[in-house]
Structures are given as C-alpha cells and as structure tokens.
C-alpha cells in the first residue's frame, strides 16, 4: 500500500521544488508584463516582427517582459526586449513535442507542470498582452480574465492585439455568452482590444506610470 502511494508523494515534492525554484529565481522581479502568443509564427511573418517591436517598446521603458520562453511570437517578444533595459524572461514548459527555450532570455526557467508555470506568470505581472495564438494563448487569456473577474488578483490591464484576429471570439462572447447571461456586461470591460502593438504598449506603460507615480 505504501509503495503504491510513493509516486504521488514524489510528484508533490516535484511540484514544491518547481514552486520554490521559480519564486527564488524571480524574487527580485517587479512589474513584469506577461505576453502570450503562438509558437507557430515564423521569423518572416508580420506577426513575428510586431511581437519583436512590442518587446522593444516595453523593455526600452525598463519593463520586464515575461513569455512562455518558446519559439514563434514568444521568441520574437523576448528578442525585441533582450538588448534593452527591461529583463527578458521565459518560462518554458515540458511538452510531448519538445519546446526548446529561445536564445533571447536573461532568465529562463523550465517547468513540468502547467499550473506552477501559470502561477509564475501571474505572480509578477502588472499586465497581460495576448498576441494571436491558439489553445495555449486562449487558456492563459481566460485564466487571467477569470482571476480578475473573481477578484483573486488585483485588476490589471489585459490587452488583445489584432482586431481582425480576435473579432470572431469577441462577437461570440457578446452575442452568445453575454446574451445567455453567462457573463455580465461589465465582464467585457476586463480587457481592451487594440490593433497595434504600439497601442498595447501605451496602455501598459500608462498604467505602470499611474500606479508607480
């Protein structure tokens, strides 16, 4: 009976180890912006170039940039941030298809468990930016919205970049989810939709200046 329980006990210790390591490695991190986006965009895509620009805009202001640490738009945002004042940080995750950390990181952490990684994304964030992405981006976006909606975290800006990309989702939320009273009208005010990374960066920078001033 004891042997049968041992794998679960060791799993708890691994979870604890990831939490402790993440907290210690990021203990000095203040006022980071967490950026989500697809790993599937290539370097020559307009989305990759825009994500690089976003990282540059934030990091030039001394704002740490936190991503999932992988390729695609995560890499682009870290790449834009890397040469500038704000730290470039990646929280990588172990996946069935190997996700290799991108090379543009001042700090890179590796996680086995999604929920520990999510905790780290939120713990140090003063804002979330969602670039075009798939299930992972949607997962992180709605996690952030739920935490703010339920007041489990202090409200901070959540910005979606790309009106054309996000329009269908927002239409569904308004015309179906809100219409069926599964959310309140005020819940749609928990995020902002913009068309450019310049607009997204301005929202975040203004928020940080207002709350740090």
Image: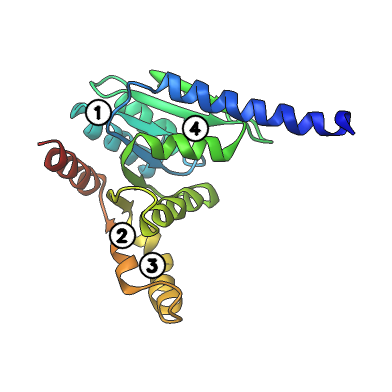
Say whether marks 1 and 4 touch (CB < 8 Å).
Answer: no
Question: Residue at position x 56%, y 26% from top?
Answer: 18
Q: Say what secondary structure mark 3 lies in.
A: helix
Q: Which residue is mark 4?
A: 71
Residue 20: percent from left, percent from top: 51, 23
* Mark 4 surroundings: few (<14), some (14-19) or many (≥20) residues within 10 A: many
Pair 1/4: label in front:
1
Q: Which residue in the rendered view is the most extreme toward the bottom? A: 179
Q: Which residue is mark 2?
A: 190
Which numbered disc flags the more N-terminal residue, 4 or 3?
A: 4
Q: Which residue is mark 3?
A: 170
Question: Residue at position x 24%, y 33% from top?
Answer: 58
Q: Say what secondary structure mark 4 lies in.
A: loop
Q: Quadrant of the N terminus?
A: top right
Which numbered disc flags the more N-terminal residue, 1 or 4?
A: 1
Q: Which residue is mark 1?
A: 59
Distance from Cα at disc 4 to Cα at disc 3: 27 Å
Distance from Cα at disc 1 to Cα at disc 3: 29 Å
Distance from Cα at disc 3 to Cα at disc 2: 12 Å
Of residues 56 and 187, the one drawn nearer to the viewer in this rendering: 187
Which numbered disc flags the more N-terminal residue, 1 or 3?
A: 1
Distance from Cα at disc 2 to Cα at disc 1: 24 Å
Taking 139 as reference, is 99 above or below it?
above
């Amino acid at each position: 009976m004891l042997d049968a329980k041992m794998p679960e006990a060791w799993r708890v210790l691994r979870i604890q180890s990831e939490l402790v390591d993440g907290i210690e490695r990021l203990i000095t991190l203040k006022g980071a912006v967490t950026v989500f986006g697809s790993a599937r965009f290539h370097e020559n895509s307009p989305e990759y170039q825009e994500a690089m620009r976003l990282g540059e805009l934030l990091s030039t202001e001394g704002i740490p940039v936190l991503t999932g640490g992988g390729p695609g738009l995560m890499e682009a945002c870290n790449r834009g941030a890397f040469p500038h004042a704000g730290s470039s940080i990646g929280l990588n995750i172990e996946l069935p298809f190997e996700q290799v950390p991108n090379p543009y990181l001042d700090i890179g952490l590796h996680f086995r468990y999604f929920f520990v990684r999510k905790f780290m994304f939120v713990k140090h964030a003063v804002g979330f930016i969602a670039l075009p992405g798939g299930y992972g981006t949607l997962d992180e976006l709605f996690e952030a919205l739920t935490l703010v909606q339920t007041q489990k975290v202090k409200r901070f800006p959540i910005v979606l970049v790309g009106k054309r990309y996000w329009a269908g989702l927002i239409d569904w939320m308004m015309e179906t989810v809100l219409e069926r009273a599964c959310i309140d009208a005020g819940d749609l005010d928990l995020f902002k939709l913009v068309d450019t990374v310049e607009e997204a960066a301005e929202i975040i920078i203004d928020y940080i200046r207002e709350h740090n001033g």
